[in-house]
Image (spheres, rainbow, N blue to C red):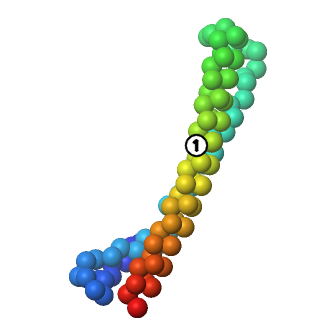
Amino acid sequence: MAAVVLGFRHLEPVVFKSRLPRRIKKARRIPRSPLTRIDVTREEYNRIIEILNERGDIINDLRAQLEIQFKRMAQLQADVDLVKRRERT
């Protein structure tokens, strides 16, 4: 449920979301299956699983780095907002 409020200085609608966006879950590791698979060779299957797990690790690292960058941007934006507030007074 979103509420719409008119801003005080501008007559633009401001939309407040009632819940935070969902977090992206970490990529989980894919387990190897039992030896009963017959569609592909065991070596091919294991290689595919290794590649997928490596890519999952890369995605998790990128996700962690993005979180750090967003925190830094939020800190910088807070500093900029503070400077703007001090200039107004």
Q: Nearer the viewer, residue 82 or 51?
A: 82
One can see residue 70 in this view: yes
Residue at the spot of label 1: 62
In the rendered image, the vertical position of residue 52 relative to residue 70, given as above or below: above
Left or right of residue 86: residue 14 = left
One can see residue 38 in this view: no
- Say which quadrant the C terminus sits in: bottom left
Q: Residue at x 29, y 83 (%)?
A: 6
Left or right of residue 1: residue 58 = right
Q: Amino acid at mark 1?
A: Leu
Q: In which image quadrant can residue 41 be found?
A: top right
The x, y position of residue 74, in whole percent, is 52, 65
Q: Residue at x 50, y 61 (%)?
A: 73
Within-10-Å neighbours for mark 1: few <14, some 14–19, many 20+: few
Q: Nearer the viewer, residue 28 or 1?
A: 28
Left or right of residue 51: residue 77 = left
Q: In which image quadrant can residue 16 be found?
A: bottom left
Q: Residue lying furthest bottom in this view?
A: 89
The x, y position of residue 17, in whole percent, is 43, 71
Q: Secondary structure at mark 1?
A: helix
- Say which quadrant the N terminus sits in: bottom left
In the rendered image, the vertical position of residue 10 relative to residue 46, given as above or below: below
Q: In which image quadrant can residue 15 be found?
A: bottom left
The x, y position of residue 43, in whole percent, is 70, 10
Q: Residue at x 47, y 68 (%)?
A: 77
Q: Residue at x 70, y 11 (%)?
A: 42
Q: Residue lying furthest right in this view?
A: 35
